[in-house]
Each structure stands twice: as C-alpha cells, then as structure tokens.
Image (cartoon, rainbow, N blue to C red):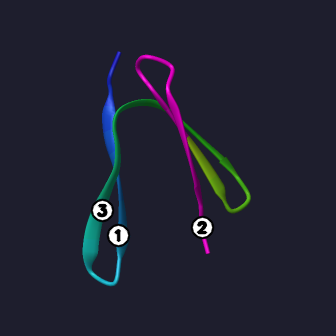
C-alpha cells in the first residue's frame, strides 16, 4: 500500500494538510482525507 502526503498550494505557498494519507474523497467543495490509522480530516474549499 502507498501512503501520500497531501499539500494545498495557495498563492505560491504550499501547506501540508496531512501525512500518510491512504484515501481522498471529494464531494463538491469538501475534501475528506483518511490516514493509514483511520483518522480523518475534512477540508472545505472556498
């Protein structure tokens, strides 16, 4: 299995959102990241 680090780039700057991500779900403007241990993080795009 491959894990990834997820970054968001805004105005030329990169911000780390989460490491060891195994799943990314996108629903409209909402991004749900799931880590290797099952932890989740939600990010809503503007």
The segment highlighted magenta reads 33-46
Looking at the image, residue 8 lies above or below residue 10: above
- Identify the residue under disc 1: 9
Say above or below: 12 vs 6. Answer: below
Pick whichever, 8 or 42, lies toward us.
42
Whether the magenta-drawn stretch holds residue 40 is answered as: yes
Residue 28 found in image quarter: bottom right
The percent coordinates of residue 18 (x first, y second) are 36, 43
Residue 15 numbered tag = 3
At horizontal 27% and vertical 67% (from top left) the residue drawn is 14
Label 3 crowd (10 A; few <14 / some 14-19 / many >=20) = few
Q: Secondary structure at mark 2?
A: loop
Q: Which residue is mark 2?
A: 45
Within 10 Å of disc 1 (Cα), the crowding (few <14, some 14-19, many 20+) is: few
Q: Can you tell which quarter of the image residue 36 is in?
A: top left
Q: Position of residue 32 (x, y in %)?
A: 59, 43
Q: Are marks 3 and 1 in contact (CB under 8 Å)?
A: yes
The earlier-in-sequence mark between 2 and 3 is 3
Pick out the residue farthest to the right: 28
Where residue 35 sits in the image (x, y, percent)? 44, 27
Q: Position of residue 4 (x, y in %)?
A: 32, 35
């Amino acid at each position: 299995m491959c894990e990834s680090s997820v970054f968001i780039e805004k105005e030329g700057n990169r911000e780390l959102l989460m490491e060891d991500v195994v799943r990314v779900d996108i629903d409209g403007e909402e991004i749900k990241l799931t880590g290797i241990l099952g932890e989740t993080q939600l990010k809503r795009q503007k």
